[in-house]
Image: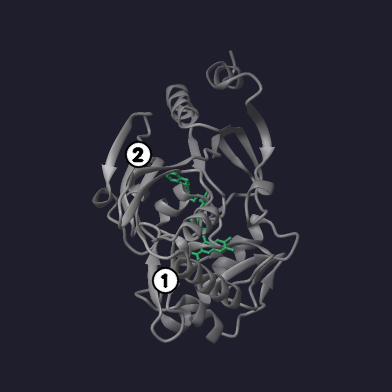
Amino acid sequence: MGILEQLEAKLGKGRVRQNISLAPYTTFKVGGPVEFYFEAKTDEDIINAIQTASNLNIPFFVFGGVSNVVVSDKGMKGLVIKNQVMYKEIAEDRSGHVILKVSSGYSMTRLAKETADEGWSGLEYHVGLPGTLGGALYMNSKWYINPGKNRQEVYVGDPLVRAGLVTRDGVFKSVPKSYFNFAYDYSILHETKEIVLWAEFKLAKISPEETKLHAQTSMDYRKQTQPMGIASSGCYFKNVKGESVGKMIDELGLKGYSIGGAQISEKHANFIVNTGNATSEDVKNLVTFIKKRVKEKYGIDLEEEVLTI
Ligand SMILES: Cc1cc2nc3c(=O)[nH]c(=O)nc-3n(C[C@H](O)[C@H](O)[C@H](O)COP(=O)(O)OP(=O)(O)OC[C@H]3O[C@@H](n4cnc5c(N)ncnc54)[C@H](O)[C@@H]3O)c2cc1C
């Protein structure tokens, strides 16, 4: 039996696709074909797919919104597990807070909007964040409260209480927030490569007027500062010791500079956008160029936030 047949024997006939382009599933719209592609609809699907890939000794990747990934034009070997697991339930309801259990494939923007509508505070600031809860915990995705002079960062990991993970061998474990070692653009998952199945958040009960105002202020600030309606992967580089890389690239006069179809956004210099026909090679060349210019002027080695495969 070939690999496809073996995957289908475990994951379901007709549920694994071979040699499909991943580009349409990504927010950057670049990249070549993926060898095997499977859409997970339940937690069991994810565990099953991980165990099967692990037993067959083929590489596997779990993606959510594929909003922080650039896939090579040559494509990628192995199995892509696209997380489409969507559920949400109240695990505890007290007078001052709720504990909400959410699947890792849940859309972050939908979660932010729904919790804002209920008056549950903690995640409403992330309205407009592309991708899923799993990807947001992997990267400890962030946004800002009090935009302007008193701007403070707020992270998706902040209100986390506990999460259910799967190891690379497909073994389940439940861990507390402290396990994640959250920091800026960082969680322990960068090292362990474990997969989040679900997460529980403690959200304070305040008035829906307040939470909706938080969400609206966040969305307004996002619209003001980020390019909208154009393909990208968000901020390309990590900020350096709190210093804005966007500001550095802007000071180099590089806004609007492009290589092929990859362009440094006119609106936010840390965004690389796809003007329509970009290839991963264009993105790679532009990244190399930016890194060189920043190193020359500031002596800083930039590090990518976006995962390149
Ligand atoms: C327009 C735009 C705006 C953005 N704005 C922001 C912003 O304000 N703040 C911010 O921090 N980021 C931002 N980003 C980047 C990106 O959206 C976030 O990092 C997002 O949280 C990634 O989620 P995802 O589901 O798309 O992850 P993916 O891109 O699918 O995956 C990214 C990484 O997470 C891992 N991963 C995915 N799911 C899981 C899981 N269930 N368990 C373990 N690991 C997993 C993947 O294996 C991969 O390594 C933006 C991107 C775009 C395109």
Is residue 304 among what the camera can see? no
Instruction: Using the image, determine if residue 213 lies above or below residue 309.
Output: below
Instruction: Using the image, determine if residue 181 lies above or below residue 298.
Output: above
Q: Which residue is mark 2?
A: 164
**Secondary structure beneath label 1:** loop
- Residue 95 on image: x %, y %: 30, 55
Residue found at the very far right of the displayed protein: 276
The amino acid on which the numbered mark 1 sits, given as a three-letter code, is Asp
The amino acid on which the numbered mark 2 sits, given as a three-letter code, is Gly
In percent of the image, x 55 and y 70: which residue is there?
A: 219
Numbered disc in front, either 1 or 2: 2
Closer to us: 267 or 71? 267
- Residue 180 on image: x %, y %: 29, 51
Q: Which residue is mark 1?
A: 301
- Residue 191 on image: x %, y %: 33, 47
Question: In which quadrant will I find the N terminus?
Answer: top right
Spatial separation of the CA atoms under disc 1 and disc 2: 35 Å
In percent of the image, x 57 and y 74: which residue is there?
A: 220
Instruction: Using the image, determine if residue 52 lies above or below residue 271.
Output: above
**Secondary structure beneath label 2:** strand
